[in-house]
Image (cartoon, rainbow, N blue to C red):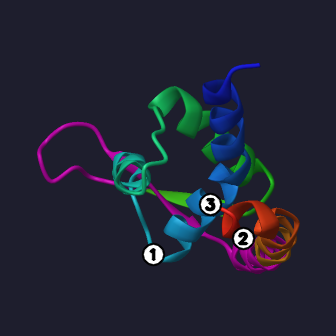
Amino acid sequence: MKLENTKAQMRKGVLELCILSIISEGEIYPTEIIEKLKDSKLIVVQGTLYPLLTRLKNAGLLEYTWKESTQGGPPRKYYQATSLGREFLQGLISTWDQLQHAVNQSTKNLTNNE
């Protein structure tokens, strides 16, 4: 079993939480989402982000508006969280907190001995 594969799977597991959290801060363009994730060391490529955004939009958690580009180019899609999306995010954060506590409790002896 390869450690890098397991680490990648763990990152993917929290990606939805992180993306919803970023979008809940306000209207945002996908490239900006990717930059924020990269800054947090959660490297994501467009091929990973766009299907997730579509799934979240189809679930009613996100919506988007088209805006003209300030650099001349085609209009851009800007995403924002819906009220359902913000409510869903609160549930994810609560679940994350519980999971993080459970993991910390179950690994506490390992981390204290190092």
Work out how far the residue at label 2 is from the one at label 1, CA to CA, in angstroms: 12 Å
As drawn, which residue projects farthest toward the front? 113
| Element type where label 2 sits in the image | helix
Q: Which residues are magenta?
A: 66-95
**Mark positioned earlier in the residue sequence (3 or 2):** 2
**Disc nearest the viewer among 3 and 1:** 3
Amino acid type, residue under disc 2 in the picture: Gly
Q: Nearer the viewer, residue 62 or 113?
A: 113
86 drawn magenta: yes
Q: Which residue is mark 1?
A: 26
Q: Residue 36's spot in the image, x, y percent? A: 38, 57
User: Are circles 3 and 2 on residues that touch, CB within 8 Å?
Assistant: no
Work out how far the residue at label 3 is from the one at label 1, CA to CA, in angstroms: 41 Å
Q: Nearer the viewer, residue 76 or 84?
A: 84
Q: Which residue is mark 3?
A: 114
The image quadrant where one finds the N terminus is: top right
Which mark is on residue 85? 2
11 drawn magenta: no
Against 72, residue 27 (above or below) is below
The image quadrant where one finds the C terminus is: bottom right
Q: Residue 41's spot in the image, x, y percent? A: 43, 49
